[in-house]
Amino acid sequence: MSAVIWLLISLPLGAGAVLGVTGTRCNRLAPALGVAVAVATLGVAVAASVTRPQSSAPLFAGMRAGLAVDGLSAFMVVTVAAVTTAVLAFAAGEFGPDENRGRLFGLMLVFSGAMLVTVTATTLPLLLMAWEVMGATSWALIGYWWRRPERVRAADTAFLTTRTADLGLYLAAGAAVAGGAGSLDLRALPDAPSPWLHVITGGVVVAALGKSAQLPFSFWLSRAMQGPSPVSALLHSATMVAAGAYLLLRLHPLLAATGWAGPLVAWTGAVTALFLGVVAVAQRDLKQLLAASTSSQLGFMVLAAGSGGIAAGTTQLVAHAATKSGLFLAAGAWLTALGTKHLPALRGAARTYRLLGTAFTVGALTLAGLPPLSLWAAKDEVLASAYAESTGLYAVGLAAAAVAAVYSIKALWYVTQPLPDDPEAGYDTERDGTRRTARTTPAPLLVLTFAAAVLGVLALPGPASWLKRLVGAPDEPSPKPWEVGLSAGVAFAAAGLAWWWASRPAPVPRPAVRWARGWLHLERAAHTVVVRPVLGLARALAVFDDRVVDGAVRQVARGGLATARIAGRVDDGIDAAVRQTARGGLAGARLAGRADDGGIDAAVDAVAAGARGLGRAARRPQTGLLHQYYAQAALGFAVLVLIVLLVR
């Protein structure tokens, strides 16, 4: 049975890695292979949701990599696999052979595999690994057209923002180890002792809010719209942005254990749903409107997680995934056909492309929360959980639901209006449109549209009770009849007002409109509060390093060189003295040699010569004649007498 869950994650990860590496070498086969792998993964996901496999393997010393499909993840694996299949089928006709289709389809499969690991992981180390792969592949997908600098900057902004929040998971893992949760099993985290419990919870909350584009991290989702439309449909419907909300739903016991995390998460979700809904109303770009609405709709899921509505949040997540992926694909098809996603330029687009128009209409009405479509029923479940927690939460959530109807009807109003006299003048603002839709467009759009319309059955009394038992929340509150009626009335009233007011200038001050259209200027605030101070500190540290640390090193080096020069000069002097001494010694040796030659040797020679002369002189008297010897004796005797007489 464990083979099913390993196949579930290895199939998209392995095939995606192979496709990504081969790149353009399998450009012709990449779409077909990608769709085939996605369909196979969907089949395995359905089997896993029925059989509920689980498995684990050694990872580090004392830690295991755990995977399991339970009631909550059973919904998610099917949702992720189904949306991936629909998006890849759509992308097969959107990207021509001149694009690197191997890299695109490979990255999307790897991303899908990482998301499947995220929703089935039962231990924090494996969750962290999948979280990292998901972040890296999202950066590569958003910056897919990397030769355009603005798209690369958008990918960098999205990656760095979510990456900063992701550090919370590392903080949580470190606190869990410090608190004694050696196995890092997700189910053991609520049992961590204080204060580690609060550190773990804080890290998880920050990481989840960042990944799900909740305040104050929402602005990264605006920049992520620079990616291809299929990428937006995949990342910003059922996968990346939903991962944070799913994590909060999964770890609701951890939020409840602290006492403060649940209300904080619930209020963050409610405020995000309201304020990002206002941002969506102000947009004039269709993809920007859908992006802001994604943050807003995810706010309802976060609100459900914070208020204990696990089943309600799951219903909202699944219904939103089908709705938003279909809307993004329709927007992408119009962008390909008409070369624009500017709302005023899309007047009459639904009339020109009727199939797209029908799918977009159903999706927009679903997003507006109009009964009996799925998000109306899902929002009622979320609002029921919010009402059980706090009347204030319910009021803010209901206001956010009204705003959702406004931005949805605004988009629908533009695309269903009659064509202007010269529609061509407004087309091709971003690229040259093909004036046709791909053959692969209708099938995935129709499937997603149908799912968006009917998934509300999960909120009906019978299926809702089954779902609550499945996710382990049987006592979760259900909406009362007056709540159902009130939310329906608010949705219809807001939708009618939005349709009537769509062609009129909004009675709102221009600075407020610019503030909302600029996504509350959160990116500017992030640059002011975080980026510029960090860069300023980096520059200051660089100057300190250059002038103080490196300066000190350079001064020491200069001192060493100066000392070396002085030592060299002293050494040269010593060498000179040695050379002078050597020269003096040589001169003395020469003088001594001369004295020896001319003095001592001369004296010795003179003594020897004198001795030789005396010898010769002494030999002369030795003649052998007696009378000569007698005469010599008489002379010597006379000299001796003379000396005696003189001395006396």
Image (spheres, rainbow, N blue to C red):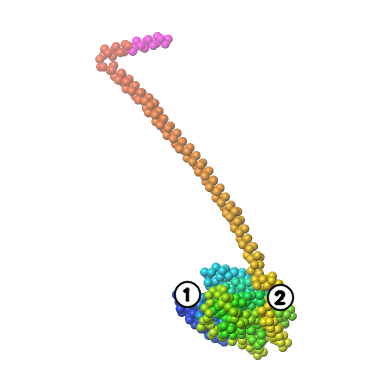
Q: Quadrant of the C terminus?
A: top left
**Element on which disc 2 rests:** loop
Answer with the quarter of the image where residue 321 lies.
Answer: bottom right
Tag 1 residue: 98
Q: Residue at x 54, y 46 (%)?
A: 562
Q: Amino acid at mark 2?
A: Pro
In the picture shown, does residue 568 fall above or below 297?
above
| Quarter residue 313 falls in | bottom right
Task: Return the mark for residue 507.
Answer: 2
Residue ID at (57%, 54%): 550
Q: At which x and y percent is residue 126?
A: 57, 75
Q: Is residue 530 magenta?
A: no
| Real-space CA distance between mark 2 and mark 1, rounded to the nearest whole angstrom | 47 Å
Q: Residue furthest right?
A: 391
- Dot 1 falls on a residue whose secondary structure is loop
Q: Amino acid at mark 1?
A: Asp
Q: Position of residue 625 (x, y in %)?
A: 25, 15
Look at the image and give the residue range highlighted in magenta. Answer: 636-648
Quadrant of the image occupied by residue 214: bottom right
Judge from the rendering whether residue 438 lies leftward or rightward of residue 210; answer left or right.
Answer: left
Q: Position of residue 513 (x, y in %)?
A: 68, 72
- Ranked by sequence position, the earlier of labels 2 and 1 is 1
